[in-house]
Amino acid sequence: MSTSTSSSRYTCEICGITFNTINEKEEHVKLEHEEHHPPTGVG
Ligand SMILES: [Zn+2]
């Protein structure tokens, strides 16, 4: 296990942008990487 860095930052695993808060990252992912969920549910 690797200890996280002192500075708590959230990095977008899609494009690699760092955010100060997870809210910003989640919003960024939803806005920039919004995906259309398929009608078919995969179990
Ligand atoms: Zn991103």
Image: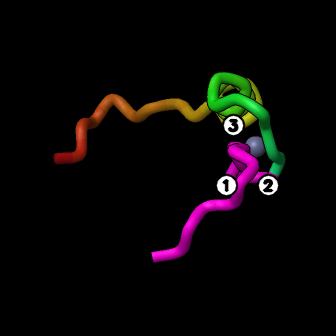
The residue most toward the front is 6
Instruction: Name the secondary structure under disc 2.
Output: loop
Q: Residue at label 3?
A: 33
Q: Earlier in the sequence, mark 1 or mark 3?
A: 1
Q: Is mark 2 within 8 Å of ligand 1?
A: yes
Instruction: Name the secondary structure under disc 1.
Output: loop
Q: How far apart in space, not on screen, are marks 1 and 3 (Cα)?
A: 11 Å
Q: Residue flagged by tag 1: what amino acid is it?
A: Glu
Q: How is the image coloured?
A: rainbow
Q: Residue at label 2?
A: 16
| Residue 4 included in the magenta stretch of the image | yes
Q: Residue at label 1?
A: 13
Q: Is mark 3 within 8 Å of ligand 1?
A: yes
In front of the other: 14 or 23? 23
Is most of the magenta stretch helix, strand or loop? loop
Q: How far apart in space, not on screen, are marks 2 and 3 (Cα)?
A: 12 Å
Q: Is residue 8 above or below residue 37?
A: below
Task: Look at 70% across and 53% down and name the residue there.
Answer: 14
